[in-house]
Amino acid sequence: MKQKRKLVTEIPGPRSRALWERRTRAVPAAVGTTLPIFVQRAQGGIVEDVDGNRLIDLGSGIAVVNVGHAHPAVVEAIAQQAANFVHTCFQVTPYEGYVAVCEQLAARTPGNHEKRSVLVNSGAEAVENAVKIARAATGRPAVIAFDQAFHGRTLLGLSLTAKVVPYKKSFGPYAPEIYRAPFSYPFRGTGRLAETLEWIEASVDVSQIACVVVEPIAGEGGFVVPEPRWLEGIAQWCRSNGVVFVADEVQTGFGRTGAWFASEHEGVVPDLVATAKGLGGGMPIAGVTGRAEIMDAVHAGGLGSTFGGNPVSCAAALAAIDVIEKEQLVERAQMLGNRMLERLVALQHDTTGIGDVRGRGAMVAIELVNDDGTPDAERAKRVCADCHTQGVIVLTAGTSGNVVRLLPPLVLDESLLDEGLDALEKAVRG
Ligand SMILES: *Cc1c(COP(=O)(O)O)cnc(C)c1O
């Protein structure tokens, strides 16, 4: 498919609007929609809708298609594996692909220690399993999560997640023994390391803490990059107190931030790493990778999932990991990120209402604020809607909903990125 933006109808067009009618009768409004165009095809950095409009994708299906939509190597791996076998359940009769993905996870995640991995289906499931493993390994119940945290929509995932509307509202009661500490938020000047550690020690019996679950960069929480050394300080505190350090790299993993994993930027080696989104090149697959002695502390048969590490998803993951390596997408993420930051910082100085420009690699956001510095969620919504009308897919984020985030596929042409940024700039200038 030609890597070019093309608008042939208004957005959404008549065919998408007709499908939207059908959708409203079949799917509850509880399942949200960022942009109600219905997709027909997607390739590389372009999404084509049923009306023939071609949009530039700066969202990657929420940081999933890091290798681009329908990468030929991924498509080929899927087709070949599907022709061989689609499912057996790894716990019934195993297959090589699962083992090979676990070997790749061991090789790519931070640290040279001996590792094991378990494969599951989604980010939420990975985080839940990380907590189960940490509890089994320590014999302790308590879990520390943070402000700005997002860890998925299952009950434990939601219990760990900070944001109430829309995620948590009316779905409680939540899992017990979860404590929410301040997250480092440099733009707001909150959650310095000393403050966070004091909060933990004052609020929880440290001898009862199984694990700290932390995103190295808060994703849904607004691409908040903690202040330098904060993550390292938390990891060090965990080591001193026998607490398992769990990095939720579901959104930040697989080259997204200009490193294989975002923990690397801080020189941090997590005890357990939860992965999902970018792992499968578009197919659903997730994992928990960790120190052998922690992973092996769980009793035989204690972990598993019917579909976890599905053979087709494993084949796609192996292909996607190979593409990230061969096409040097980690380096490319850095290049795309620098390009975005440069443009957006210039825009911030030349306009009003952009309080902060931040991010790492191809994970970049602007935080929109009112004159008094309070969050301006309305403006974020308007900016996104304007980009969509121009044929550029962007997403919002932030606990207050006032952040516009950019997560382009790491294969995106520079010229398409520039075009997307032109549209964003026009939207911000209004
Ligand atoms: C998306 C996300 C999750 C949840 O992943 P699902 O696959 O939607 O369950 C968990 N943690 C982080 C950091 C995420 O970005």
Image: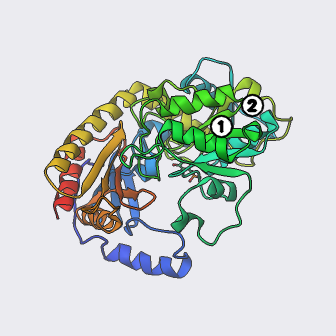
Which residue is disc 2 drawn over? 295
Residue type for callout 2:
Met
Q: What count of labels does the image hold?
A: 2
Asked if residue 147 lies left or right of residue 409, the reply is: right
In the image, residue 95 above or below residue 43: above
Q: Which of marks 2 and 1 is nearer the N terminus?
A: 1
Q: Disc 2, disc 1: CB below 8 Å?
A: yes
Asked if residue 292 lies left or right of residue 269, the reply is: right
In the image, residue 28 above or below residue 101: below
Q: Which quadrant holds residue 120? A: top right
Q: Residue at x 86, y 35 (%)?
A: 300
Asked if residue 321 lies left or right of residue 246, the reply is: left
Near mark 1 (Cα within 10 A), the count class, few <14, some 14-19 or many ≥20, is many
Which residue is disc 1 drawn over? 288
Quadrant holding the C terminus = bottom left
Image position, residue 369 (x, y; %): 29, 59
Coloring applied to the structure: rainbow
Image position, residue 70 (x, y; %): 43, 45
Residue 378 visible in the current orientation? yes
Residue type for callout 1:
Val
Q: Which residue lies furthest to the left in this view?
A: 350
Which of these two is toward me, 105 or 169?
169
Asked if residue 159 lies left or right of residue 33, the reply is: right
Q: Residue at x 44, y 28 (%)?
A: 265
Q: Which residue is drawn at 42% across and 61% down?
A: 400
**SS state under label 1:** strand
